[in-house]
Amino acid sequence: MKIAVFPGSFDPITKGHESIVNRACTLFDTIYIAIGINANKSNLFSLDKRTKFIEDTFKKNPKIKVVSYQELTVKLCQELGAKFILRGLRNTSDLNYEFPISHANRLLDPSIETVFFITDPGFSAINSSIVRDIYKHGGDIKAFIPDAVEL
């Protein structure tokens, strides 16, 4: 069984995230969307809301499970029996950020492989920070988030 973990804050989940997960379903039997909890980071949406957004987005897909975690991503993978970490790349800046993290994870556990998906061109300008900023300032974010997400 091929199990992957897709870690992130998902504050909120975007259409880019949704696209990556849907495409990754062709490669993996189970994908855990893992919401990282960072006490030093203030989130716009609560953990419960983010969990609900993700569950609503993928409610018809039995391959998707949602978990939250505070430990290292590699540790979570070990606990879940996942041999893959799923990451999305929108641009070279994302690659520069993700590259050393993937190397560190590989040093921590060489049996866990990071798999990168290039974001669909239509979603490459979308990130959660921009979506949060639009939302905080009263803008409509429906174009950026999955249709199943109700605010």
Image (cartoon, grey):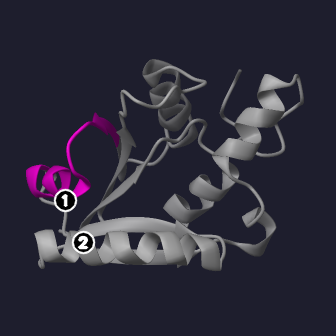
Query: What element does badge 1 sit on?
Result: helix
Asked whether 68 falls inside the magenta stretch, the response is yes
Tell which of 142 and 88 is nearer to you: 88
Q: Nearer the viewer, residue 12 or 27?
A: 12
Within 10 angstroms of label 2, few (less than 14), some, or many (20 or more) residues? few
Amino acid marked by disc 1: Val
Quarter assignment of residue 109: bottom left
Badge 1: how crowded within 10 Å, few (<14), some, or many (20+)?
Answer: many
Residue at 54% x, 27% y: name it: 43
Residue 55 visible from this viewpoint? yes
**Quarter of the figure with the N terminus:** bottom left
How far is mark 2 from mark 1, CA to CA?
Answer: 10 Å
The residue that mark 2 highlights is 104
The label number, if any, that marks residue 74 in the structure image: 1
Q: Position of residue 74 (x, y in %)?
A: 19, 59
Q: Judge left or right: residue 66 versus residue 54.
A: left
Residue 60 appears left or right of 15: left
Label 2 secondary element: helix
Q: Amino acid at mark 2?
A: Ala
Query: In the rendered image, which quarter contains the C terminus?
Result: top right
The residue shown at (74%, 55%) is 126
Q: Which residues are magenta?
A: 66-79
Whole-percent x, y for residue 23 in the image: 53, 69
**Residue furthest out toward the right:** 139
Q: Is residue 122 magenta?
A: no
Q: Residue at x 28, y 78 (%)?
A: 103
Residue at 47% x, 34% y: name it. 55
Asked if disc 2 and disc 1 are in contact, CB closer than 8 Å, the reply is no
